[in-house]
Image (cartoon, rainbow, N blue to C red):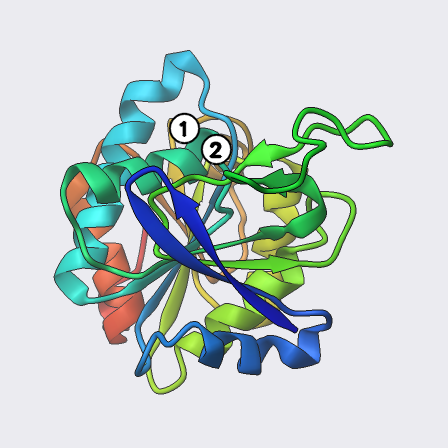
């Protein structure tokens, strides 16, 4: 396993490259995060224009919660959609909460990173890493979704002694996998409706998994209540 400091235009970010999932605990130690955290796993993808305002408002709420609770946020780390928005929100507000990007080494690039920055040999585009994350874990895999088990396991390791929650904004089939793996770990999932795609699909289901709760993306107070309930263990507040 190797470590590397990535030089972005206005910051230097530590990145680790574990070879197998058994190395994940050691990789997290290499990041020098220090201590354990309540953990928010933020999942989602591209932001559609018609849901953009509600989505950005929700991400602002989530970033403020993370700052206020000294929580650690895990997200995909690429410079697109939900992943980009949480990084930009952290930077714009000068927040200090740890923001850990976990994604596939083979699918991303960065300043002075892999030379084939436009397309891989199999025709897949390399995505830029979002420059405002505090840490990166770049893992093996060739298709988005291969990182999902790493994200779920990292949340378990990083939240030891605390609680964790998964928050879904919009989402696709990769996000569906993330949700399923979170539920297998008995990690509660908050799906933010009015952000599109998977989150809205779940909100329309009359019968859902008991650990899935729906909240409108524009309802800041409700999101705060649900995240606090999940991370502080106040189960009486979690009912939708």
Q: Nearer the viewer, residue 212 or 26?
A: 26
Above/below status of 194 relative to 110: above
User: Which mark is on residue 207?
Assistant: none
Q: Position of residue 34 (x, y in %)?
A: 31, 80
Q: Residue at x 54, y 57 (%)?
A: 209
Above/below status of 190 relative to 80: below
Q: Are marks 2 and 1 in contact (CB under 8 Å)?
A: yes
Q: Position of residue 19 (x, y in %)?
A: 72, 69
Q: Residue at x 23, y 74 (%)?
A: 232
Q: Position of residue 132 (x, y in %)?
A: 33, 44
Q: Is residue 186 visible?
A: no
**Mark 2 — residue?**
170
Q: Residue at x 31, y 72 (%)?
A: 38
Give the residue furthest to the top: 50
Give the residue furthest to the bottom: 161
Give the residue furthest to the right: 122
Residue 8 sits in quarter? top left
Under circle 1, the secondary element is loop
Q: Residues within 10 Å of mark 2 (few under 14, many from 20)?
A: many
Q: How many marks?
A: 2
Q: Residue at x 74, y 26 (%)?
A: 119
Q: Position of residue 137 (x, y in %)?
A: 54, 61
Q: Residues within 10 Å of mark 1 (few under 14, many from 20)?
A: many
Under circle 2, the secondary element is loop
Q: Quadrant of the N terminus?
A: bottom right
Above/below status of 118 relative to 19: above
**Mark 1 — residue?**
195
Q: Nearer the viewer, residue 54 or 206?
A: 54
Q: Nearer the viewer, residue 175 or 204?
A: 175
Which mark sits nearer the N-terminus, 2 or 1? 2
Q: Is residue 151 visible?
A: yes
């Amino acid at each position: 396993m190797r470590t590397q400091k990535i030089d972005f235009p206005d910051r230097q970010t530590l990145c680790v490259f574990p070879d197998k999932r058994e190395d994940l605990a050691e990789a997290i130690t290499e990041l020098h995060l220090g201590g354990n955290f309540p953990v928010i796993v933020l999942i989602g993808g591209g932001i559609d224009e018609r849901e953009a305002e509600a989505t950005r408002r929700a991400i602002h709420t989530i970033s403020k919660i993370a700052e206020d609770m000294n929580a650690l946020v895990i997200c995909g780390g690429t410079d697109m959609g939900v992943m980009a928005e949480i990084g930009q929100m952290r930077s714009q507000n000068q927040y200090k909460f740890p923001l850990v990007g976990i994604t596939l080494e083979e699918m991303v690039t960065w300043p002075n990173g892999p030379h084939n920055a436009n397309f891989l040999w199999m025709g897949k585009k390399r995505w830029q890493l979002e420059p405002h994350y505090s840490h990166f874990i770049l893992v093996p895999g060739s298709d988005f979704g291969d990182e999902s088990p790493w994200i779920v396991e990292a949340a378990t390791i990083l939240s030891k002694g605390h609680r964790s929650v998964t928050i879904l904004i919009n989402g696709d089939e990769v996000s569906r996998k993330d949700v399923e793996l979170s539920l297998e770990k008995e990690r509660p999932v908050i799906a933010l409706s009015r952000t599109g795609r998977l989150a809205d699909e779940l909100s329309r289901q009359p019968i859902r998994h008991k650990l899935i709760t729906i909240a409108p993306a524009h309802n800041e107070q409700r999101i705060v209540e649900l995240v606090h309930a999940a991370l502080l263990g106040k189960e009486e507040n979690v009912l939708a």
